[in-house]
Every structure is written in structure tokens, then in C-alpha cells.
Image (tube, grey):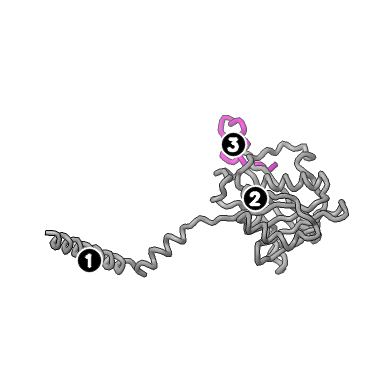
Amino acid sequence: MASRSAQATATSKKRKNVDREEAEQDVPGGAGALTTSSSSTKPYKSKVLILCSRGITYRMRHLMNDLANLITHGKKDAKLDSKHALPSINELADLNSCNHALYFESRRHSDLYLWASRCPNGPSIRFHVVNVHTMDEMKMTGNCLKGSRPIVTFGKEFEDEAHWKVCKEVLTNVFAVPKTARKAKPFVDHIISFSIVDGKIWFRNYQVTNCSYPSPLRPSPSIISHKNLI
């Protein structure tokens, strides 16, 4: 009886293997196609390491905090010693599972430089930050939701030359929040705009609001509601 039951079990296993091979043959590409399709649906994970050098002023620190609030998939780290900062950024990004980095470098307590890079193989871009206005200084009514995903827009000047295209790619990777970000919320209520004027990149953040007006006796669809940028 024991030998018969073992033989029946082996026969059923062979039948299952044959059925499985036939099913894989029916699918184009076999088992490899199934593996590829499952791996293609893997969510893209992107994190930005945000850190600064020692000796930054309060104004520079407020600017860094403002950008950290806009970058939902960002991760802040401690200050670095300016003498050995750049070689260790890739190591810190690897330890924090980040593939992009924003480094605020202060020189002589007056000049601020912003490094934007893709870790660990680059490219890296250094910007000289001028004409800074923090969120506390602005007296406007903009109040976009914290954690919402932005729409990142670029001017047509970014397509004129090769180095502007590289800047556009790096800035897109840093400021475009992916859907799979842990702290991202399913709302889009502000626009991050990059434009080039006089060889300088201007950064602006706009809030998108819905404005509705009281409908007249015969309302027109074009004037009932529209989008405003603040």
C-alpha cells in the first residue's frame, strides 16, 4: 500500500510539471516573460539627500528648510565639514538610500553655492545662489498643501544648448516627486517653475487655486471658474 501511494504521488507531480510547462509555452516568451512583466511593475524609488556645510547663516538655513518642505521625497542630514564635504556626500547618500543630493555650501559667510547631483556617478552641477527670498519674507497669500506633488515646468530656453539640457534633467530628478514617495499626498496644487533670464535660472513656486464667481442669469462656462496662480 505504501509503494502504491508513493507511485501515485510521483505521477501527480509529473502531471503538474507537464501542465506547468504547457502553460508556459502558451505564453509568449515562457517563464521569462512572466518574470519581466512582474519586475517592470516595481515602483520607482527616488530620494534626495539635503544637507549643508558648517558656517551657513540663518538666511541660508531658512532657504534650505523651505526647499526641504517642497521636496517631499527629501531626507535631511547633519552639517558637514567644508574641508572634506564633497568626497563624503556619495557615502552619505548610499547610507541613507538616496540617489540624488542637494548640498548647500557657504563661503565667507556671504556666498551661497548649491550643488545638485545624481549619486554616485553624476552629473553634478554647482549653482551660485543670488536674490534669495525665503517664505517667511514673502507676504503673499499662497498656502499650498504640505506633501502635495508639484508640476515642474521649464522654459523653452532649456532646449537651446546642451548644458541647459543637463540642468533640466538634474533639476527634474530632484524636484519632481514620484508617486511612490512615502510622504507624498495624492494632490497637485502648486507649480514649480524654472526660467532663464540673462543667463540665470529663476526658481518660483506658484500655488494653484480654484476661483468661482457668482453665476449671472445666463452664466457662461468660460467665466464661472478658472485657475489662478499665486
Question: Nearer the N terminus, badge 3 or badge 2?
Answer: 2
- Is there CB contact under 8 Å for labels 2 and 1? no
Image x and y of residue 83, in percent: 81, 60
At label 1, the amino acid type is Lys
Q: Residues within 10 Å of mark 3 (few under 14, many from 20)?
A: few
Q: Which residue is mark 3?
A: 224
Q: Is residue 105 above or below residue 208?
A: below
Q: Position of residue 55 (x, y in %)?
A: 83, 50
Name the residue nearer the viewer: 177 or 138: 177
The type of residue carrying mark 3 is: Ile
Secondary element at tag 3: helix
Distance Cα–Cα, label 3 vs label 2: 38 Å
Q: Nearer the viewer, residue 119 or 77?
A: 77
Mark 3, mark 2: which one is toward the viewer? 2
Could you tell me the amino acid type at mark 2?
Gly
Task: Write down the region rendered in magenta.
Answer: 211-230
- Give the crowd class for mark 1: few <14, some 14-19, many >=20 residues within 10 Å: few
Question: How much space separates mark 3 and mark 1, taking CA atoms?
Answer: 70 Å
Determine the residue positioned at 11% across, 59% down: 1
Instruction: Identify the residue at the far front of this view.
Output: 2
Disc 2 marks which residue?
Answer: 74
Residue labelled with disc 1:
14
Query: Where residue 152 sits: x, y (%)?
Result: 64, 53
* Residue at the spot 75% in from the left edge and 38% down from the top edge: 140
Q: Are marks 3 and 1 in contact (CB under 8 Å)?
A: no
